Image (cartoon, helix red, strand yellow):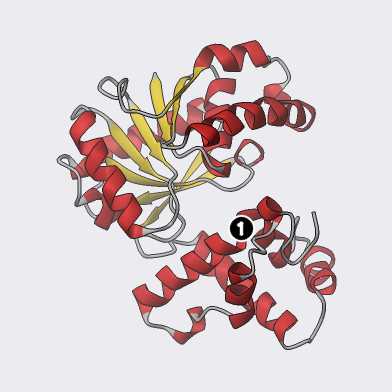
């Protein structure tokens, strides 16, 4: 099996690492050479962490990753792929451009996993010559530690693509949870309400981030609080997803908290910038 991962950000790196750790030949593609250099370093560093926390990674070596992951800025080796998993930012214009490029270079047998948290899978599939080959794959962060993937059936998604997706995810050590295509699906229609309302609680000075997250962790038994989760995802990504949800449903419950937008404008993006609701 040969899989290409498009986008070498946080999610793309972890997906490439997950694929290679399970012996799958992987291409990691990004337009920015510096992002690929950073990805190579980060993947090797992250392997040390996952070897300690996930038994499936204990036997994986850096040499295994080097032999299984190819880093590239072009589409030269995309003509003979089983899968493309796309991870570019949640911006429709950017996704549209990427899928138009993929339609030109991939074979009609290639299947496409859209790793999006909110954007319509049906809308993406309409860009492709074989729309039945497109399915949503909403991986959770951090990918190697999450046992399930929210998998989204678009209007055009074929039964064969669903079966192929289940097989791919099983080969990655993942369980497929199949849902239907509405913006935000299940995970983000719920989680973004929590994160957005938690930001309103900070803005309204009801409680500080530590106390808000403590209620979720110690009261509800969640592994992470909503503000810790927002910092991990990236506040810019949270804001972009809320805008997609608001535009899609025209429902005021998805109105982005002004504090979130202000923090993004100030460059406080969470863990990836070193500061969000918490300092890193």
Depth check, front residue: 156 or 66? 66
Depth check, front residue: 76 or 201? 76
Q: Tell me if residue 255 comes above or below residue 235 in the rendering.
A: below
- Which of the 4 image quadrants contains residue 266? bottom right
Which residue lies at the image location 33% right of the left edge and 58% below the top edge? 92
Examine the rendering and report whether any part of residue 120 can be seen. Answer: no
Residue 131 point in image, percent of width and height: 20, 45
Q: Tell me if residue 257 comes above or below residue 70 in the rendering.
A: below
Q: Residues within 10 Å of mark 1 (few under 14, many from 20)?
A: many
In the picture, the quarter occupied by the C terminus is bottom right
Which residue lies at the image location 42% right of the left edge and 77% below the top edge? 246
Examine the rendering and report whether any part of residue 144 can be seen. Answer: yes
Residue 129 point in image, percent of width and height: 14, 41
Which residue lies at the image location 40% right of the left edge and 26% below the top edge? 3
Per the image, the residue denoted by label 1 is 234
Q: How many marks?
A: 1
Residue 203 point in image, percent of width and height: 71, 84
The reply, left or right, for residue 227 in relation to residue 111 is right
Mark 1 element type:
loop
In the picture, the quarter occupied by the N terminus is top left
Which residue lies at the image location 19% right of the left edge and 44% below the top edge? 128
Which residue is the extreme one toward the left?
A: 129
């Amino acid at each position: 099996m040969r899989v290409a991962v498009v986008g070498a950000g946080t999610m793309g790196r972890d997906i490439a690492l997950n694929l290679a750790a399970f012996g799958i030949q992987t291409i990691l593609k990004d337009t920015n050479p510096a992002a690929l250099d950073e990805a190579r370093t980060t993947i090797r560093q992250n392997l040390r962490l996952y070897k300690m926390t996930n038994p499936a990674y204990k036997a994986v070596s850096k040499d295994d990753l080097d032999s299984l992951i190819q880093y590239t800025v072009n589409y030269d080796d995309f003509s003979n792929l089983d899968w493309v998993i796309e991870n570019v930012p949640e911006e429709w214009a950017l996704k549209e451009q990427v899928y138009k490029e993929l339609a030109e270079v991939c074979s009609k047998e290639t299947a496409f996993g859209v790793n999006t948290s909110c954007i319509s899978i049906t809308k993406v599939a309409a860009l492709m010559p074989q729309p039945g080959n497109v399915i949503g794959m909403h991986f959770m962060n951090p990918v190697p530690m999450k046992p399930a993937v929210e998998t989204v059936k678009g209007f055009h998604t074929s039964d064969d693509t669903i079966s192929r997706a289940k097989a791919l995810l099983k080969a990655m050590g993942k369980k497929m949870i199949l849902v239907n295509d509405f913006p935000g699906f299940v995970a983000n229609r719920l989680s973004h309400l929590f994160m957005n309302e938690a930001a309103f609680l900070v803005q309204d000075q009801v409680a500080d981030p530590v106390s808000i997250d403590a209620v979720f962790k110690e009261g509800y038994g969640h592994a992470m609080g909503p503000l810790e989760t927002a910092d991990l995802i990236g506040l810019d990504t949270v804001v972009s997803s809320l805008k997609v949800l608001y535009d899609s449903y025209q429902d005021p419950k998805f109105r982005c908290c002004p504090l979130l937008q202000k923090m993004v404008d100030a460059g406080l993006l969470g863990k990836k910038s070193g500061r969000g609701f918490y300092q890193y």
